[in-house]
Image (tube, helix red, strand yellow):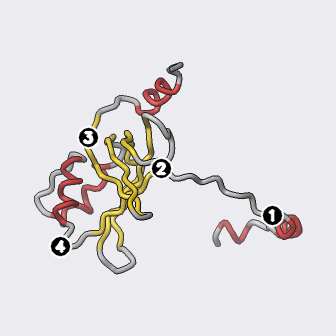
Amino acid sequence: MSDFEQIDLAELDNKFESEEASETNHTPVPDGKYQVNVDKIELTRSKSGNPMLKWTLRIIGPTQRKRLLWKNSVITEASIKWLKRDLIIAGLVLAKLSDLEHRLHELLDIQLEVKKVTKNDYENIYLQRLIEIDDPDAQASTQDSVPF
C-alpha cells in the first residue's frame, strides 16, 4: 500500500475548489557565469529515445544562490565530442563511454563554473571549468554578507 492511499484529503476539497491558484513569480536565471554544485546526475533517455545525461546544478555563487540550472546532454554520434569535453572538464576521464553509468557517482557534489546562454528561447548551459570550494554553503553565505 502506498503512502498516498493512507492520506485522506477530502476534508480540504471545498477549500481547494474555491481557492484561486497563486501566480508564480518564476523568473529565469539570467544569462551569465555561475559557480554550481552538481546536486544530481542521471543517465536516462530523451523523448526521441536517445541516451541522455541529465545534470541538476545548484548555484552556489556569485549571485542567484540556491537556484537550479539543468543541463541535458543528449548522446548521439554527433554530440559525443561535446559530452567527452564536458566529462573531462568535470574531472571524469573515461576509457570507454560504456563506463559512464558505473562512474556517475564521481560527478556528484563537484563544483563547476558554468555559463548560461539563452538564444531564441533555448537555454544552454556550458561547463567552463572544475573549481574547488571546501564548503560551498559557507562560501556562498560569506559572499551574501559582503556589504557592497
Task: Say whether disc 2 or disc 4 marks the residue closer to the N-terminus.
Answer: 2
Measured Cα–Cα span from mark 3 to mark 1: 45 Å
Residue picked out by circle 3:
130
Image coords of residue 142 (percent x, y): 47, 23
Q: Is residue 18 left or right of residue 138?
A: right
Image coords of residue 12 (percent x, y): 85, 65
34 or 57, which lies in front?
34
Q: Do the residues labelled 3 and 1 touch (CB within 8 Å)?
A: no
Q: Which amino acid does label 1 sit on?
A: Glu
Q: How crowded is mark 2: few (under 14 residues within 10 Å), some or many (20 or more)?
A: some
Q: Residue 20 carries which label?
A: 1
Residue picked out by circle 2:
68
Q: Determine whether 48 is above or below 57 in the image.
A: below
77 or 97, which lies in front?
77
Residue picked out by circle 4:
77
Image coords of residue 79 (percent x, y): 21, 67
